[in-house]
């Protein structure tokens, strides 16, 4: 549970003594476990895939972050496109909402295999595909370390998402 992680970090004074803490939280906005860690965040990045359902859910998360930002310091920092060869649908959404892609991780079997082997991408033998993923993680880390200006937290209306990403 998220609260156990926050409690442990507080007990060891790691929230005060650390420059960057990354919470990887399942984005189910109906769950209180999603919103509570935002109380401790400066920037929230949304991980999504390049498909309608994922972008529709991302829109709900944008809305939740906007609501939390009224009482807490958290602001949107960007989008990570994950397990998607293309980014065209996310790019359309970002173009309307003012969000931007911070990283892109394609659909690679090597990523799935690293999870099955219970190791990070940095522990695997550096094939060209794995090296590309490692480089993208390092680029993302450098961008996060450098900091970013907050992005707008203005979600789209449901009907507008259908119109934007719907099929003709």
Image (cartoon, rainbow, N blue to C red):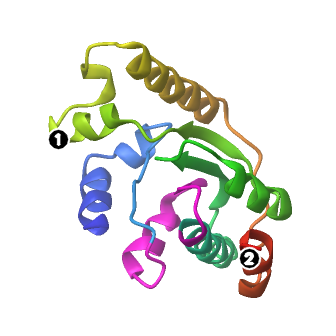
Question: Callout 1 environment at 10 Å: few (<14), some (14 to 19), or many (20+)?
Answer: few
Sequence-wise, the earlier of marks 2 and 1 is: 1
On the image, the x and y values in percent for residue 16 come to 44, 45
**Nearer the observer, 12 or 116:** 116
Residue plotted at (27% across, 31% down): 120
Apparent side of residue 158 relative to residue 123 in the rendered image (left or right): right
Residue labelled with disc 2: 161
Q: Which mark is residue 116?
A: 1
Residue plotted at (68% across, 45% down): 101
Is 41 a magenta residue?
yes
Give the extent of the magenta segment: 28-53
Residue plotted at (41% across, 48% down): 15
Quadrant containing the C terminus is bottom right
- Up-down relation of residue 79 to residue 74 (above or below): above
Apparent side of residue 135 relative to residue 150 in the rendered image (left or right): left
**Nearer the observer, 36 or 134:** 134
Mark 2 lies on a secondary structure that is helix
Mark 1 lies on a secondary structure that is helix
Apparent side of residue 117 relative to residue 135 in the rendered image (left or right): left
Residue at mark 2 to residue at mark 1: CA–CA distance: 35 Å
Question: Callout 2 environment at 10 Å: few (<14), some (14 to 19), or many (20+)?
Answer: some
Is 40 a magenta residue?
yes
- Up-down relation of residue 38 to residue 139 (above or below): below
Task: Name which quarter of the figure residue 4 lies in.
Answer: bottom left
């Amino acid at each position: 549970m998220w609260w156990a992680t926050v409690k442990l970090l507080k007990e060891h004074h790691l929230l005060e003594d650390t420059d960057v803490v990354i919470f990887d939280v399942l984005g189910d906005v109906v769950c209180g476990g999603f919103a509570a860690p935002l109380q401790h965040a400066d920037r929230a990045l949304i991980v999504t895939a390049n498909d309608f359902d994922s972008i529709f859910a991302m829109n709900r998360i944008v809305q939740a972050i906007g609501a939390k930002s009224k009482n807490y310091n958290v602001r949107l920092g960007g989008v990570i496109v994950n397990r998607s060869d293309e980014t065209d649908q996310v790019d359309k959404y970002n173009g309307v909402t003012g969000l931007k892609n911070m990283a892109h991780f394609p659909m690679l079997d090597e990523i799935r295999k690293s999870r099955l082997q219970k190791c990070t991408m940095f522990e695997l033998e550096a094939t060209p595909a794995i090296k590309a993923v490692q480089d993208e993680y390092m680029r993302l880390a450098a961008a996060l370390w450098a900091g970013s200006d907050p992005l707008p937290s203005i979600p789209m209306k449901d009907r507008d998402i259908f119109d934007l990403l719907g099929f003709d």
